[in-house]
Image (tube, coloured by chain):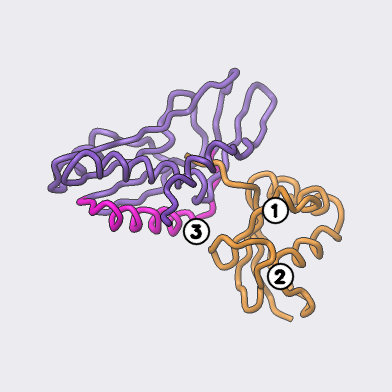
Chain colours: A purple, B orange
Amino acid sequence: MIRVLVTDAAIDVAAELDALERAGGGAVATFIGLVRDDGGVEELFLEHYPVATEKALSDLVAEAVQRWSLAAATVIHRVGAMAPGARIVFVGTTAAHRAEALEACAFLIDRLKTDAPFWKRETRGKDARWVGERDSDHHAADRWKQP
Amino acid sequence: MADIDLLYFAWVRESIGVGHERVTLPAEIGDVAGLIDWLAARGGGYAEALGDKTRLRAAVDQLFVPLDASIAGAREIALFPPVTGG
C-alpha cells in the first residue's frame, strides 16, 4: 500500500495507523510533526506547489519502498493555516522487521524536508514571516545518500 | 519566442504580487538565470524578489533544477525560495 496525500484537513492518525497495521508486515514506524509555538507563533501557514508536491512525495515513497522492501508507506502533509499543536505531517511505514520500518520512516521525513516544495509562514501578532531553510535539514537529508 | 507559464511561491509570490502569469519570452533567454535577470529588470516587486539569485530555487516543468538549467521547450517555470516543509 502506498498512500500520498496533500490536504487542508486534519490528519486522522488512528485511521492511518490502522491501514498501516493491516498491510501485512511485522513492524510499523511512524513520525508525526506538530506545529511549534516557537516564540509565540499564533498561526503557521503552509503553501505548496500543487502537482509538483505530489510528484516529489510519490518519488520519495517509491524510493523508500524499494530500498527497504516496505509492505506499506504513507506520507500525508497538511497545507493552509494551522494552530500550534496541530499535526503538519504524518509519515508511516510497514515492513517485515523494525530496522527497515524505522530507517525508511527517518529517510522519508528527512528527505521530505529538502525535496518537497512546501513553504512555512509564521504569524506572531501582526508580524508574518517566511521561515528560512536550515543547514541541519540538509545534513539530515545528506546522510541517506548512497555511494 | 514562446509563451510559457510562470509560477511564484512564498515571498517571491508576495513581492511580485501574483502567483501566476503567462509571458512571451524573448528568444535570447536560454536558462533559468537569464529568465530571472529578464524579470528582475522589470523593477519594483520583481527586482525585490529576484535581485539576489542565491535566495532562489527553480523548477522547470515541475522538476527541481539548478539555475543554469536550460529552459528550451519549457512550458512551466516556477521560482521560489528554498523549501521549508515537514
The amino acid marked with disc number 2 is Asp
Q: Which residue is rendered at x = 75% and y = 51% of the image? A: B16
Instruction: Specify the quadrant of the image occupied by residue A21.
Output: top left
The local secondary structure at tag 1 comes to: loop
From the image, tell me which residue sits under label 3: A52
Q: Nearer the viewer, mark 3 or mark 2?
A: 2
Q: Residue furthest front?
A: A147
Task: Tell me if B12 is positioned left or right of A7 in this view.
Answer: right
The image shows residue A57 at horizontal and vertical percentages of 41, 53
Residue nearest the observer in this picture, A2 or A93 = A93
Residue nearest the observer in this picture, A129 or A91 = A91
From the image, tell me which residue sits under label 1: B18
The reply to whether dot 1 and dot 3 touch (C-beta < 8 Å) is no
Mark 3 surroundings within 10 Å by alpha-carbon count, few (fewer than 14), some (14 through 19), many (20 or more)? some
Q: Which residue is rendered at x = 66% and y = 63% of the image? A: B6
Alpha carbon distance from label 1 to label 2: 22 Å
Alpha carbon distance from label 3 to label 2: 20 Å
Task: Tell me if B29 is positioned left or right of A88 in this view.
Answer: right
For the record, the magenta segment spans A46-71
Instruction: Specify the quadrant of the image occupied by residue B84.
Output: top right
Give the chain letter at badge 2.
Answer: B
Are labels 1 and 3 assigned to the same chain?
Answer: no
Are labels 3 and 2 assigned to the same chain?
Answer: no
From the image, tell me which residue sits under label 2: B31
The amino acid marked with disc number 3 is Ala
Task: Tell me if A26 is positioned left or right of B56 in this view.
Answer: left
Q: Name the quarter where the N terminus of chain B is drawn.
A: bottom right
Membership of A58 in magenta stretch? yes
The amino acid marked with disc number 1 is Val
